[in-house]
Image (tube, grey):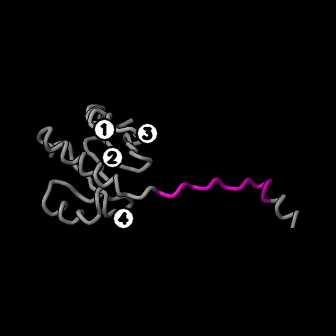
């Protein structure tokens, strides 16, 4: 798994005091869910942070961060911050707190419904 274990440990330490934190391993890193919502992800050498979309443009223009991109699509409200651009604990805490503050008001993704099994679907059709 290609991710920065040192950076993952820093994030763990920064959010360990929170009551509802879930860490999930992913192919390219570790994802931290807070209150059942995407909050922070750690990859090779950078953080992905879910932030207030209203702050997005200002942060990208004035801070050392960039918009998250997947498959050529940009995601407003998700930014990437390189570990090399985090000079000290104060800067690290700034980014983590930015994500945690938005997490308080962010909406959780809707729960995925389990697909109806084919056998059950057939039974429903027969009943009608």
Does label 1 or label 2 sit earlier along the sequence? 1
Return the residue at label 3. 24
Return the residue at label 2. 40
User: Is residue 55 depicted above or below 50 in this figure?
Assistant: below
Does label 3 or label 2 sit earlier along the sequence? 3
Circle 3: element type: strand
Q: Position of residue 17 (x, y in %)?
A: 32, 35
Q: Main secondary structure of the magenta part?
A: loop
Circle 4: element type: strand
Q: Position of residue 66 (x, y in %)?
A: 23, 57
Return the residue at label 1. 15
Identify which residue, 25 or 19, lies in the foreground.
19
The image's mark for residue 76 is none
Left or right: 45 in relation to 24: left
Does label 4 or label 3 sit earlier along the sequence? 3
Residue 38 falls inside the magenta stretch = no
Quarter containing the C terminus: bottom right
Range of magenta residues: 109-121
Quadrant of residue 64 within the rendered picture: bottom left
Circle 2: element type: strand
Return the residue at label 4. 73
Does label 4 or label 1 sit earlier along the sequence? 1
Identify which residue, 53 or 63, lies in the foreground.
53
C-alpha gap between disc 4 and disc 1: 29 Å
Q: How many residues crowd mark 3 within 10 Å: few (<14), some (14–19), many (20+)? A: few
């Amino acid at each position: 798994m290609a991710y920065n274990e040192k950076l993952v440990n820093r994030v763990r330490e920064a959010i360990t005091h929170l009551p509802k934190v879930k860490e999930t391993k992913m192919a390219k890193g570790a994802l931290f869910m807070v209150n059942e919502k995407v909050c922070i992800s750690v990859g090779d050498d950078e953080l992905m942070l879910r932030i207030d979309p209203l702050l997005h443009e200002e942060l990208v223009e004035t801070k050392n961060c960039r918009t998250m991109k997947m498959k050529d699509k940009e995601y407003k409200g998700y930014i990437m911050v390189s570990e090399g651009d985090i000079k000290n604990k104060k800067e690290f805490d700034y980014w983590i707190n930015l994500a945690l503050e938005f997490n308080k008001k962010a909406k959780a993704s809707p729960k995925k419904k389990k697909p109806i099994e084919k056998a059950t679907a057939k039974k429903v059709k027969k009943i009608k």
